[in-house]
Image (cartoon, rainbow, N blue to C red):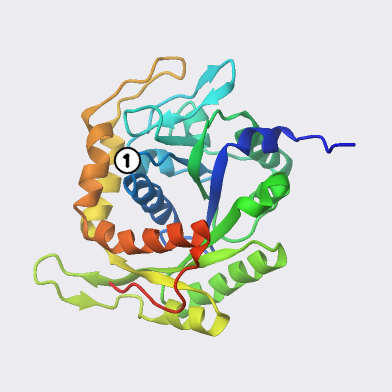
Amino acid sequence: MAAIETPVAKRLKTIKHVIIVCSGKGGVGKSSVSVQLALSLYASSPIARVGILDVDLTGPSIPRMLGLDGRGVLQSSEGWVPVYADGSETRLGCMSVGFLLKRREDSVVWRGPKKNAMIRQFLSDVRWGELDYLVIDTPPGTSDEHLSLLEHMAPVHSRLSAVIVTTPQAVALMDAMKCLSFTRTVNLPVLGLIENMSGYVCPCCGEVSNVFSTGGGQEMARQEGLTFLGSLPVDTELVTLLDAAEAAMPEQAADEPPRRTERTFRLIDQYQQTSSSKLFKPIVERLINALAGGGVGGDETVQA
C-alpha cells in the first residue's frame, strides 16, 4: 500500500532545494544574510526561481528588508500567493507573518501550538509553484519553530540543508556550537558557516577595524570539519539599502491588489553595487555547486 502524501510534501514537491539559515543567538545578522542569499541566488541565473520564507514569527524582518512592508497576502484557489519582490511575479517570492499583521508594529504573542500551526500553514498553503531554491529564515537559537519546521518537512528531508551564521566573538561562537549540535541531532546537513560582521571597512579610507575580533568562525569550522564559506564585514551600503526599505512601500490593505514601485525593480541592481554582493557571489557559487552534488570545495575560504 502506497504511503499517503502529506499536504506539506505535496506542496513542496516542486521545490528543488530548501536552505535553512540559522544562528545560535540573535544580533548576528542572520536575516540580512538570508536576504543576501535569496538575492544572490536570484542573480545567479536569469531563470533562477527563488522563494524566501520568514519563520521568525515574533520578529519578522524580511518584508522590510525586501521593501515589501505594508503588503498583504492574497488568496487564490490554490492557496496563499507569495508577495513578489522582483516585479515579475514569478522569480522572487516571499512569505512572512509580517504580511498578516494589521499594523507592522503589532507584536506576535503566541505559544508553541499556535506557532506550530502557523508554520504548518506556511508550508502547506503557500502557492510557491516551481522553485529552484527556498531560503528559510529561522529565529535565533533552537526553539519550537525549528522543531516544527523539521517535523513538518520530514517527507522532503533529503532536499533540506542548513547554513549557520555567526559573528567572530566568543559568545556568538559558543552559541553557534549549540546550533551545530542541533543540526547533528536532527541529521540536518550543514552546507557551511558564514562569519558575519567580520570587521568594519571604513567607507572613507578603506581601513578594516576588527570590531568583534576576527577569524573565530573560520577556526570553529576547521575544528568541527565544516566548510567555512566566508567572512562578511559590516557594510554601511548594505545597511542603508535594507533600512531604506520601510519608506519605499506605502501602506496597503490586505485585500488590495499589490502596487509596484520603482524600488522593486531596482533592488537587485542596488544590491549588486554593494561590496557585500561581491563577497557573497563566490559564497553562493560554492553553495550551488554543493547542492548540485559537487561538494563545497574542501577547506577553501572566501575572505573579506
Q: Position of residue 297 (x, y in %)?
A: 44, 73
Q: Residue furthest right?
A: 1
Specify few, some or many for label 1: CA neighbours under 10 Å numbering under 14, 14-19, or 20 or more.
few
- Is residue 2 left or right of 300 when viewed as pictured? right
Secondary structure, mark 1, is loop
Amino acid type assigned to the residue bearing label 1 in the image: Pro
Q: Position of residue 14 (x, y in %)?
A: 58, 36
- Is residue 16 left or right of 206 when viewed as pictured? right
- Is residue 195 left or right of 3 when viewed as pictured? left
Residue at x 51% of width, y 34% of height: 130
Q: Is residue 119 above or below residue 203?
A: above
The residue under label 1 is 46
Quarter holding the N terminus is top right
- Is residue 263 left or right of 5 when viewed as pictured? left
Quarter holding the C terminus is bottom left
Residue at x 67% of width, y 68% of height: 184
Q: Position of residue 40 (x, y in %)?
A: 34, 51
Residue 115, image quadrant: top right
Residue at x 31% of width, y 59% of height: 281
Q: Position of residue 64 (x, y in %)?
A: 37, 40
Residue at x 53% of width, y 61% of height: 293
Residue 159 versus residue 174: which sits nearer the camera? Answer: 159
Q: Is residue 145 above or below residue 226?
A: above
Q: Is residue 43 above or below residue 24?
A: above
Residue 163 versus residue 110: which sits nearer the camera? Answer: 163
Q: Is residue 62 above or below residue 287?
A: above
Residue 106 visible to the viewer: no
Residue 63 visible to the viewer: yes
